[in-house]
Amino acid sequence: MTARPRLVFADPGEAAGLGAFLKRLLRWEKAAAVRIQAWNGVVGFFAKPARFEVLVVRTARLLESAEADTTVSAGELLEGVEESAEAFTVPAAVTGPPWAGVLPPRGGWEVFGEVPADAVRAVAAAAVGEFRERAEKLERQERTRERLDALAEEIWSRPLGRTEMPLRAAHAAHALGFLTGGGQLKLLRAGSWLRLRTPAGSVAVRSGSDKAPGLSVTPV
């Protein structure tokens, strides 16, 4: 049996952060996949949470440089996280979903704005509350998948304040635990991609005509 690569983080707390991220991801989709890329002493974890139509990214420094590019099961990756050793084992590869072949660029990002983390968290929570309130007001016969999907799309396609960033990015950041701290969050652009960067991770979306189709239901 071929030994699976075991990578060690350079900074304390990274293994616990990865574990928490994966647990939240698996709440949305038990069969979630994660693409892992390691290069120049850095490792990136890319995922597309079910129902969000965004890509989320966590990056961390490695103790020793490694080269890797594979798509794996999020559940198996979680099983290989060693918090006490600040390490993780790369699971066997799985057949990657279509999104795994179209990732945001590594470089070329330009800052086009900043937003307070507290404000983003408040806006996301308010929008979740609006979705629930309006969904509950629908008559039972009106509460169809199509009607709820349309409601979710209406809400999460709105801009974040006066920026170009759609609210779906704030929703994903909130649901995945990226908005736990304070301070200012960066808004970045690279080509057709927009990115909300937080200390815990980033959320990337395609802008304009390249944007993925409508978001599904059940915001949290």
Image (cartoon, rainbow, N blue to C red):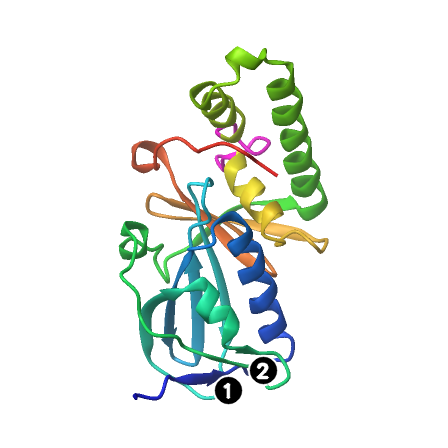
Q: Is residue 169 magenta?
A: no
Residue 63 image label: 1
Image coordinates for residue 100, horizontal then vertical, percent: 31, 56
Query: In which quadrant of the rendered view does residue 71 lie?
Result: bottom left
- Answer with mark 2 or mark 1, whichever residue precedes in sequence: 1
4 left or right, relative to 16:
left
Relative to 50, does residue 67 appear above or below in the rendering?
Answer: below
The Cα–Cα distance between marks 2 and 1, rounded to whole angstroms, is 10 Å
Relative to 74, does residue 150 appear above or below in the rendering?
Answer: above
Element carrying mark 1: loop
Image coordinates for residue 195, horizontal then vertical, percent: 47, 49
Instruction: Quarter of the image for the C terminus: give it.
Output: top right
54 left or right, relative to 143:
left
Type of residue at label 1? Leu
What secondary structure is the magenta-colored segment mainly?
A: loop
Badge 2: few (under 14), some or many (20 or more) residues near its Cα, within 10 Å? many
Circles 2 and 1 in contact, beta carbons < 8 Å:
yes
Q: For the magenta stretch, what is the residue range?
A: 157-166
Image coordinates for residue 189, horizontal then vertical, percent: 42, 47
201 left or right, relative to 77:
right
Residue placed under numbered mark 2 in the picture? 86
